[in-house]
Image: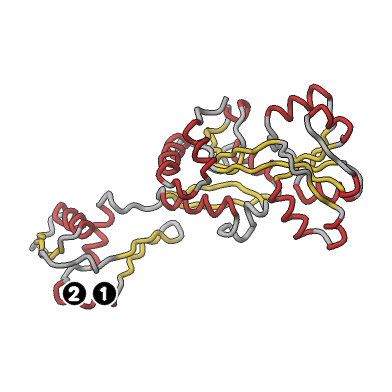
Amino acid sequence: MAHRVHCYANNVLYGLCRCLWITGIEVSISEVIANEIYAIFSYVKGSLLVVTFDMQKLKCFLPFLPITLGGILIALLLTSRVSIAEKVSLAVADWPPYYYKGRPEDGVHSHIINQLFHQAGLEVEYIWYDDWKAALNTTKAGRHDATPSWRCNVERAKYFNFTLPIFGDPYVFFHLADSQFSWADYSQLKAWEPIGVTASYDYGNEFHQAVAKDRIYLHQVRNDVLMLRLLLRGRIQLALLTRDNGLLLIKRTLTTLQQQKITYHPKPVTYAISHILFSRQKPDHQKQVTLLNRQIFQSKDLFAVDIQAIQKQWQGCH
């Protein structure tokens, strides 16, 4: 015996009715005002499909709504309009103000990533590490789908597929306030070695070429907080950090007296344009990058004007 279902002529319910009809449920369409009725479909914890109705608006139409919850769920499973979100694992580390461990919704970068993935129909799962080198290496090995906020270079392109650029952050030299540090070009940096850098970070071709040419000694550290401590102890003369990260770490991790001892030079060493890196070890890496790149162009409001211009001109990692 066929089940009869009345559907109202707005786009969403009409799509559901078509699916019910395909499954053998007899459907009739009623021309009533149904735009005030809506359902919110959300994906919860990777496995649960939840349907929530606005009861205040729905109750006015109850006499006209013999649509069963079971029928709606069948339709949802069949219609292309609603799909279960695909989960993507991102390897990250604490890096304020861009990523806060335990509070991924608050980071400058993670907030944008959350919105971008949501709009693309993807669910983000953050996997936290103590440092970014571990995040990069484990993703490279295929343990995670991707790792965000990395610059592209030819070596990384062997192991990762890159999204379009999504972030841009200036790197500057932090130094002791009484050191009278100043610089205009890379040839002056030899006198200020050792320079503190973070392992696995890419500071741009010009900086690395100058380091190789003048044999500038770089002191590599595991994380940015350690670099500031080395600066205070005189173990390094300069600390290369993004401006916002350095200023926030100084405020969060140092005493008032220590904060007064550190400043930074305003001239950027490089302007870091960064991407989300998807591991080539994962079979779906190209599909996910293509999906996100399409969404990046559709979500212009998420990105600064200068990043939008770079996105339009970007032709891959060379």
Is residue 206 toward the left or the right of residue 215 in the image? left
Q: Residue at x 80, y 45 (%)?
A: 174
Is residue 130 toward the left or the right of residue 141 in the image? right
Is residue 53 toward the left or the right of residue 318 in the image? left
**Residue nearest the observer in this picture, 198 or 73:** 198
In the displayed orientation, state which residue is furthest to the top. 213
**Residue nearest the observer in this picture, 218 or 312:** 312
Position of the N terminus by quadrant: bottom left
Dividing the picture into quadrants, the one containing residue 16 is bottom left
Q: Secondary structure at mark 1?
A: helix
The label shown at residue 61 is 2
The x and y percentages for residue 65 are 17, 71
Position of the C terminus by quadrant: top right
Picture layout, residue 65 above or below residue 116:
below
Q: CA distance from mark 1 to mark 2?
A: 8 Å
Q: Residue at x 42, y 36 (%)?
A: 290
Task: Tell me which colouring the rendered structure shows.
Answer: secondary structure
The x and y percentages for residue 153 are 62, 29
**What type is the residue that disc 2 sits on?**
Phe
Residue beneath label 1, please? 57
Decide: marks 1, 2 in contact (CB < 8 A)?
yes
Q: Residue at x 85, y 57 (%)?
A: 260
